[in-house]
Image (cartoon, rainbow, N blue to C red):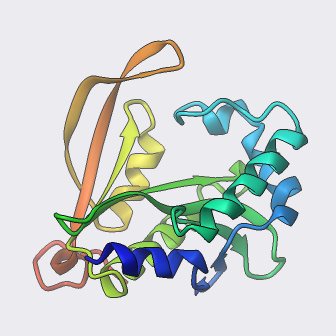
Amino acid sequence: MNRDLVRRYFTSPPVLETERLVLRRMKRSDADDMFEYASDPEVTRYLLWEPHADPRQTARYLAFIQSRYKSGEFFDWAVTDKRTGKMIGTCGFTRFNFEADSAEIGYVLNPRFWHIGIAPEAVRRVIRFGFTELSLHRIEAKYMCGNEDSRRVMEKVGMRFEGISRDSMFVKGKYVSVGTCAVLADEFFGRRSGSFAE
């Protein structure tokens, strides 16, 4: 996988579509929609960051993200409802291992859209992009133990559970154990047994 290729792609992230979603670059105008879920303690319970305190914090974050896009160093899409255009979450890559042709994926979703298949739909599309456009060999995702909903999303898109790293992170004042799930390109596209790709 080529580092320069990744930067070129994410300087101006391509628009990705699914049946119900459009994944696009985040915009400053998404601030109200993002604050709606980013301020919810239930949303951030198993994330590394605290709830946004006020809309100004969300606006500052989105302004900062624009500079990260310009340098090709931010790899997230805004997840939007195709019917309304409302931003309902984010999905993208949190890190790359260029030597191993692998990446980690992450996602967060407005709770109004939980449990209707939206998260797997977005994650599956980003995984497909990673394998087809970035020539990744492996994509993994991590979740804090207790967040079984997130693990189910991973398994629905074809990822396999690989294990628990006990007390491997110190988050919000306590040690947490972290689970890992992953999928290989051959599995995702059905060239090995166990594919869940659609």
Give percent across and percent down for residue 162.
Answer: 18, 47
Give percent across and percent down for residue 192.
Answer: 10, 79
In screen coordinates, is 132 left or right of 102?
Answer: right
Residue 153 seen: yes
In percent of the image, x 48 and y 81: which residue is there? 8
Residue 116 seen: no
Look at the picture and state if 1 lies above or below 38: below
Q: Nearer the viewer, residue 18 or 34?
A: 34
In percent of the image, x 29 and y 67: which residue is there? 158
Q: Nearer the viewer, residue 93 or 147?
A: 93
Q: Which image quarter holds the C terminus?
A: bottom left
In screen coordinates, is 109 left or right of 173?
Answer: right
Give percent across and percent down for residue 55.
Answer: 89, 42
In percent of the image, x 54 and y 36: which residue is there? 47
Specify the quadrant of the image occupied by residue 13. bottom right
Look at the picture and state if 116 lies above or below 170: below
Q: Nearer the viewer, residue 165 or 98?
A: 98
Specify the quadrant of the image occupied by residue 163. top left
> How many labels were placed on the picture?
0
Q: Which image quarter holds the N terminus?
A: bottom left
Specify the quadrant of the image occupied by residue 96. bottom left
Give percent across and percent down for residue 65.
Answer: 68, 57
Residue ranking furthest to the top: 173
Residue ranking furthest to the left: 192
Look at the picture and state if 125 lies above or below 146: below
In screen coordinates, is 20 left or right of 185?
Answer: right
In percent of the image, x 45 and y 47: which residue is there? 150
